[in-house]
Image (tube, rainbow, N blue to C red):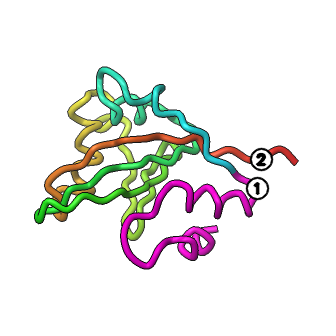
Amino acid sequence: MQRSIIMTMPPQGDTSISHAIDALESHGMVLNRASKRYIKEGGAPFHLLQERKCRLVIQIKLVNHDNQRMSHFVSWDGHTLHDYPHNSKVNDTFNRTSKKGCDNVFAKMYRRDFKNWQITNVYYLLDLDP
């Protein structure tokens, strides 16, 4: 499946969610928008990391040190943020209990290469009915 998504990515520029949707559909899966459930007061990271068992795709706007903006996607299964080439396992004690701890999970993934990050959309990954 990862290969299917990589094959639909444009050679330059951001990969749109429509590229991922097309690739997932060929594997019997679909993405449904769930942003309103997570992007709300208290912060998206906090609400996302309260999930313990899920299949979510998170869209993040990244701004690098040259002020270039790009769209990036990671997945969240309730335990680990999956991002190639590095994943981030979430600690129940330190990372889920406060807004600061939840924000830190994302910040530590991007602070070296980017000056800013923002969660812009969240999608449920669902299996299509047979």
Which mark is drawn over residue 71? Answer: none
Q: Give the residue at mark 1.
A: 28
Q: Which residues are magenta?
A: 1-29
| Residues packed near mark 1 inside 10 Å, few (<14), some (14 to 19) or many (20 plus) | few
Magenta stretch contains residue 22: yes
Q: Where in the figure is residue 104, as x and y percent of width and height?
A: 23, 43
Q: Residue furthest top?
A: 41
Q: Where in the figure is residue 93, as x and y percent of width and height?
A: 32, 34
Q: Amino acid at mark 1?
A: Gly
Q: Is residue 72 above or below residue 92?
A: below
Answer whether labels 1 and 2 touch (C-beta < 8 Å): yes
In this rendering, position of residue 123 left or right of residue 97: right
Please name whichever residue, 130 or 107, is drawn nearer the observer in this view of the structure.
130
Q: Give the residue at mark 2.
A: 128
Q: Amino acid at mark 2?
A: Leu
Q: Where in the figure is residue 129, as x and y percent of width and height?
A: 83, 44
Q: Earlier in the sequence, mark 1 or mark 2?
A: 1
Separation (CA) of disc 1 from disc 2: 5 Å
| Residue drawn at (14%, 55%) of the image | 115
Q: Is residue 49 above or below residue 90?
A: above
Q: Is residue 83 above or below residue 2?
A: above
Location of the N terminus (image quadrant)? bottom right
Q: Where in the figure is residue 38, as x and y percent of width and height?
A: 43, 29
Of helix, strand and loop, which one carries label 2? loop
| Residue drawn at (21%, 33%) of the image | 100
| Residue drawn at (26%, 27%) of the image | 98
Of helix, strand and loop, which one carries label 1? loop
